[in-house]
Image (tube, rainbow, N blue to C red):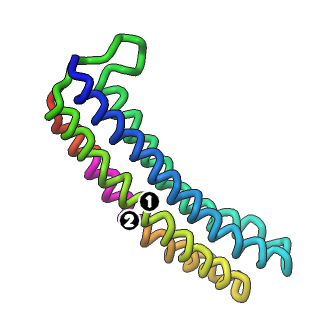
Amino acid sequence: MDLLGISLALFGAALATALAGIGSAIGIQVAGTSAAGVMTEDPDKFASCLILQALPGTQGIYGLLITFFVLNKLGLLGGGGAVAINWNQGLQIFAACMPVALVGWISAIHQGKTSAASIQMIAKKPEAMGKAIILPAMVETYAVLALLTSILMLMGVQV
C-alpha cells in the first residue's frame, strides 16, 4: 500500500471536517452573540433565535459527511481493511475534499453574520421570521453546491 496516497486522502478528509467545522463554530458563535443580546430583552424569542443560530452549523455536517464518504471509499469503515491506492488517487481524493472544506469554512462564517443580522431583524419585527430565515439560507446555497461538487468528484475517483 502506498502510504503517501492514503495519507493524502486522509488529510483531505481531515481538512473537510476541520475547516467546515471551524467555520460552523465561528458562524454559530457570531449568531449566538446576537441571539443572546436579543433574548436579554425578550426571552420569548428563544425559538426563533435558536433556529437562526443553528443554520451555520450545517457546513460542519457537510464536511463530516464527506469524511464518511472518503473513509468508506478507502475501506476504513466496517473493518474490512484499507484499499490500496497510489499517490495520484490520494491526491484526487484530497482535491475532492477541498470544495466542501474551503467553501464550508468561509460560507459558515458569512452565514453566521447573516443569521446575526436576521436575529436583529426579528428583534424588531417578529412577524418577519420567514424572511429572516431566507437571508442566511441564501448563503447555504453555496455550501450545498460545494457539498455536491465534492461528492461528484469523489465518485469519479477510481480505487
Looking at the image, the residue that sits furthest to the bottom is 124
Dominant secondary-structure state across the stretch colored magenta:
helix
Q: Nearer the viewer, residue 6 or 131?
A: 6
Q: Judge whether residue 21 is colored magenta.
A: no
Q: How many marks?
A: 2
Q: Judge whether residue 146 is colored magenta.
A: yes
> Residue at point 36% right, 11% down?
80
**Where, by quadrant of the figure, is residue 4 drawn?**
top left
> Residue at point 22% right, 16% down?
1
Which one is in front in this view, the residue at disc 1 or the one at disc 2?
1
Across and down, in percent, residue 110 comes to 48, 72
In terms of secondary structure, where does tag 1 sit?
helix
Q: Nearer the viewer, residue 153 or 52?
A: 153
The residue that label 1 is drawn on is 105
**Where, by quadrant of the figure, is residue 159 drawn?**
top left
The residue that label 2 is drawn on is 141
Across and down, in percent, residue 135 comes to 50, 77
Left or right of 46 in this view: 15: left
Left or right of 112 in this view: 156: left
Whether 134 is drawn above or below 2: the answer is below
> Residue at point 38% right, 52% down?
101
**Where, by quadrant of the figure, is residue 3 drawn?**
top left
In the image, which residues are magenta? 140-150
Whether 51 is drawn above or below 129: the answer is above
Amino acid tagged 1: Trp
Amino acid tagged 2: Thr
Distance in Å between CA atoms under marks 1 and 2 = 14 Å
Left or right of 134 in this view: 154: left
Across and down, in percent, residue 57 comes to 55, 56
In terms of secondary structure, where does tag 2 sit?
helix
